Amino acid sequence: MALAGRGAVAIWHDIAPEGRDEFYAWHGHEHMPERVAISGFLRGRRFVAVDGTPEFFNLYETASTAVLTGADYLARLNAPTVWTTATVRHFRGVARSLCEVAATFGEGAGGLCATLRYDVDASAAAAHRAAMTAALRDLASAAGIAGAHLLVADEAASGIETAERRARGGERNLVPRWIVLIEGWGDERPFTVACRTFAAAGAFAAAAGAPELAVYRLQNQR
């Protein structure tokens, strides 16, 4: 189905083996409930990879993009709990984008979700946005597809330094600028083939290189 709001937080990461059990406990019992309790946060979902990397993809849908830089969300990011601080140090290869939902189509929420991350030159952005919107509208009506969405990152908002970010330490977060999400409600293999076919199609003609594709299975939703 269409995403719940006009803003989104998209996060990809791996987890160090020694922190895996703690990550699952923290994410399910504290982190996701904490996030969706923030005013304007509407739904949170965590997915695990079945094809591609990083291993985990987390999507939070918000009422608007203003929520993403609002006082309530920033207050949480700058006051991480003890459990959060202890757990996020096990994160590896983090990519995080605060996004506008530029287009969203579909009739249902899928248990499978493909993410396609890519970049587009600023001079081609407007034309690409229109072309991708039309392509995703068509894709959303294809067999086995539950939804198709286009997210565009706010690089400045995504780069805001917070206490939670510092607790992760290590390398600088990547900020994927353009993101296509495709949701599926069927079997993994035909869905993955369909997503690979779409990734090779003309809708990405303006992209700076092939989109980075990974396919995920839903693990948790709040």
Image (tube, rainbow, N blue to C red):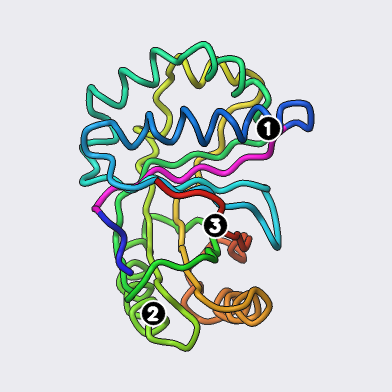
* Disc 1 residue type (three-letter): Arg
Q: Which mark is residue 140?
A: 2
Residue at the extreme bottom: 143
Please say if 47 is above or below 192.
above
Q: Residues within 10 Å of mark 2 (few under 14, many from 20)?
A: many
* Disc 3 residue type (three-letter): Leu
| Image location of residue 174, percent across then percent down | 56, 38
Closer to the camera: disc 1 or disc 3?
3
Instruction: Give the residue drawn at x 21%, y 45%.
Output: 64
Q: Residues within 10 Å of mark 1 (few under 14, many from 20)?
A: some
Q: Give yes or no for residue 10 being in the magenta stretch.
A: yes
Please report whichever mark, 3 or 2, sits nearer to the chain's N-terminal start.
2
Which residue bears the numbered disc 1? Answer: 92
Which residue bears the numbered disc 3? Answer: 218
| Image location of residue 108, percent across then percent down | 36, 72
| Image location of residue 186, percent across then percent down | 55, 78
Using residue 89 as the reference point, say whether residue 81 is left or right of it.
left
Q: Which residues are magenta?
A: 5-15
Please say if 164 is above or below 38.
above
Image quarter for residue 36? top left
